[in-house]
Amino acid sequence: MKLTQLYLLLFALLILSCQPKREIDFPATNLEEAYIIPKPLETTASGSGFALDKYTALSVLADDEAFEGVADYLSNKIKNRTGVDLKATSRSYTQLIIQQVEGFANDEAYEIDVKEDSLVLRAGTAEGAFRGIQTIRQLIPEEAITDLAKYPIWVIPTGTIKDQPQFAFRSTMLDVARHFFSVEDVKKYIDILAYYKFNTFHIHLTDDQGWRIEIKSWPKLTELGSTTGVGGGPGGFYTQEDYQEIVAYAAERHITVIPEVDMPGHTNSASLAYPFLNGNGKEIELVTSMAVGYSTLDTRKDTVYAFIDDVIREISALTPGPYFHIGGDESHVTEKDDYVYFVERVEKIVKKYGKQMIGWDEVATANLEGPAVAQWWNDKDNAQAAINQNMKIILSPANKAYLDMKYDNNSEFGLRWAGLIPVDTAYIWNPETLFPMEHVLGVEAPLWSETIRKIDEMEYLAFPRVIGYAELGWSTQENRDWEDYKRRLTYHRLFLDANGVNYYKSPVIEMEY
């Protein structure tokens, strides 16, 4: 027998050996039934299998050096999960290739072509390739076949995937002001968000109960304003180096960080540090309650805007992304004219430092220069006012998208002022139908932290609901189906368990066995 024929025979035997002789709980037969979240745009199965094992080699074909970083990320994730080192293969029977190609209209688009001897990921940008490797990670079954060869084999179903996001903005927000979360907590959350193709992370840095970001020109903000949180107890803050670490960690996962400094309301912690900022005419005291709407900056004092200028300048210099969020919600004790004057003046400061302003939907009551973004959470009239000013809208309806709402009456954490939001309610709504699509930037699920103090409590409220918001932002309405999503989500409990995520065991789906 010729050497070439021998290699072909060995390869054929390898592929045949990958077919399981007993039922194993993994998605290894039909690519169209794979448990991928978010659901890809197009999937076509071809009915065979690709063997991922110690004889699989990883290679990169790209001019952009950033593709090497994507390959390294995938290689590390596969090694940590399976023990297979794609960079240490002495000889290869199967190839995993990441290739840069032209022709993609969307920067996050990618294609995957799985054959028996190769798995090829194609994308036009490193960002698109990074989204694609999350799909590859999800295609790797949790269990390897171990009894048909002398080494474990993970079988990936063959076929093609063509995918791109529906919305360019897919985000969640974490409130670190009501209760503080460490850098490591935030990084763990970002890691899971990356797995589900989120591309934005909004961090709510300041509120009445705590100021959580170092401002070097105003040191008392953290010396006095960060000492506690809702209900008392320890506070905390990020040094500028801490914040930069979070921003860099997110950037490595192609996630843009949006900082929020909430104003003119929700500013008690700032006024506690510097009383001249206060505009409500009352004595400033340390606040640990969940009350809102009682604080305001003095919107007619020039020194207040000098303060705001410094804050925006310092944080913008640490934040490479295009946005700066000024809050603007629930300023109940700010007179309407004063509020409008304030928002219009602060927008100019944001633009001065090269950022685009985002605000909660109330900011649309001002006459803005633009471009600016309104985050709709409560008032549809405000959203319409934003549209009338040709602003983009982020969809965060509280009764559908607020992660701090209880799942049900038995939920251990959370609030209920916007209603209960079980897992199915969080998923079954159509962002495409609320406003004209040309005005919709995307979807964000905010997580306010009044009732949570630790990361396991944060995870309880976020997961599994935030996974559904990932699909709402990425997948088209035609590709979303509750029963199909429920089937896929049930399988993802294995990923959450493996990563130590304290998700809510919802009675709506089979999240516990």
Image: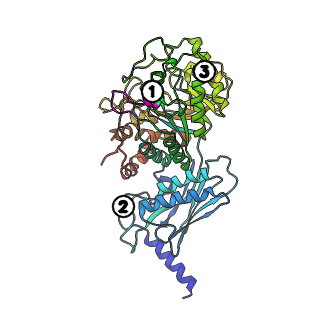
Camera-side residue of 441 and 425: 441
Is the residue under label 1 in contact with that under label 2 (CB below 8 Å)? no
Q: Residue at x 48, y 13 (%)?
A: 280
Point out the stretch of residues depicted in magenta: 222-235
Camera-side residue of 275 and 421: 275
Residue 3, by quadrant, is bottom right
Q: Which residue is mark 2?
A: 24
Image: 454 above or below 121? above
Q: Which residue is mark 3?
A: 343
Secondary structure beneath disc 2?
Answer: loop
Q: How is the image coloured?
A: rainbow
Horizontal and vertical percent position of residue 470 = 50, 41
- Which badge, 3 or 1, is on the more N-terminal residue? 3
Horizontal and vertical percent position of residue 294 = 45, 16
Q: Residue at x 41, y 26 (%)?
A: 209
Q: Is residue 230 magenta?
A: yes
